[in-house]
Amino acid sequence: MSDIHSPSGDAAADEAVPQDSPAATSARAMNNRVFQIFYSPETQAGLDSGFLPLDNTGQRPDWYEYWPIRSFLMRESLDENTRYGFLSPKFAGKTGLDSAQVMQFLAETHDDVDVVTFSPFFDHSALFLNVFEQMKFLHAGSDEIIKQALELVAPGIVVDSIVMSTASTIFCNYLVAKPAFWRRWLEKCELLFNLAEDEASEFGRLLSGDVKYDHKAAPAKVFLVERIASLILGTEPRWKVRSFNGMKLPFSYNSPLMGNALDLVAMDALKRAATETGHPEFLTAFFLMRASLLDRLATQRAAQA
């Protein structure tokens, strides 16, 4: 089943024409161009032939996927009747999806949808208040850089006030969007980019410094840029979004939350209700349910030790 929504609470989900109806199909004029990035002969050989290849060999590896996306958006003239996507070489491994499934989902999506998401890791989308809380959990010591980054790209917004459900969470930049959204995304990302490239800037050096990442390290700027799309959807209700069912995609690696899907669905629903109604009771219930789940998991781990 499709999931269409305005991520910050507009009731756009109930459309008069189903996504797969003949009337909806015949009325569509929107095209979709989905690229897959490669940066070596090995990653090129592993590309899905149903996506368009995007060459990032010999470029700026310190910016990971942001560099080829940025280069494309600044170089190409975008067609307003086309949605664009830029997927990493690991897309299939992280989502379990191939190009045929992606293109079919896009073909069934109404033209008025601005952003189509294929975000994995439903467990993280449901468990954390927002992607920045998740970043703090995964990358120890990132609190200050998150605070300064938000002051730069979203002044006046406090990180703990942003509530993100699966309606507004995008991991790995797995989205396909209209040019208007990409322009907004690039505008915010460039604020971080320009500072990170400025060696005289103290915050720029902080952005380019490494943070812990899966027993390795990578520049903080990469993880912040990965969260800009979610920030936009979580704070700007004008964008219309359709999400591939995250419950059908993989959870995070070795997730301790496997087997707790009902709790995760309920927590995600409470966050959606909080953003749609503005009633604080839903958020209170979310925090209580999360605390209960985490306590239960801790008890299970202790019993197994």
Image (cartoon, rainbow, N blue to C red):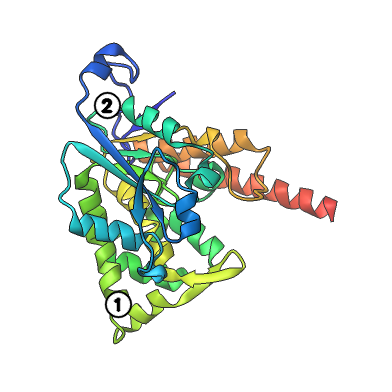
Which quadrant of the figure has residue 225?
bottom left
| Residue 177 spot, x, y in % from top left | 28, 42
Q: Position of residue 293 (x, y in %)?
A: 65, 45
**SS state under label 2:** loop
Q: What is the crowding at mark 2: few (fewer than 14 residues within 10 Å), some, or many (at least 20)?
A: many
Please state which amino acid type lies under the numbered disc 1. Answer: Glu
Q: Which sits earlier in the primary sequence, circle 1 or circle 2?
A: 2
- Image side of residue 75 versus residue 105, left or right: left
- For residue 37, side relative to residue 94 (left or right): left
- Label pair 1/2, CB-CB below 8 angstroms: no
Rendering quarter of residue 215: bottom right
**Disc 2 residue type?**
His
Percent across and percent down for residue 229 are 34, 51
Q: Which mark is residue 110?
A: 2
Vertical position of residue 91 compared to residue 6: above or below: below
Residue 34 visible at all: yes
Quadrant in which the C terminus appears: bottom right
Can residue 154 be seen from the camera position used here? Answer: no
The quarter of the image holding the N terminus is top left
Tell me what residue is drawn at x 26 percent, y 54 percent.
Answer: 185
Residue appearing at x 43%, y 40% in the figure:
118
Whether residue 252 sits left or right of residue 198 in the image: it is: right
Q: Nearer the viewer, residue 265 or 270?
A: 265
User: Does 108 sit above or below residue 63?
Assistant: above
Q: Residue at x 66, y 50 (%)?
A: 254
The CA span between labels 1 and 2 is: 39 Å
Q: Residue at x 34, y 48 (%)?
A: 234
Front position in the image: 113 or 58: 58
Along the line of sight, which residue is nearer the eye, 239 or 282?
A: 239
Q: Secondary structure at mark 1?
A: loop
Mark seen at residue 197:
1
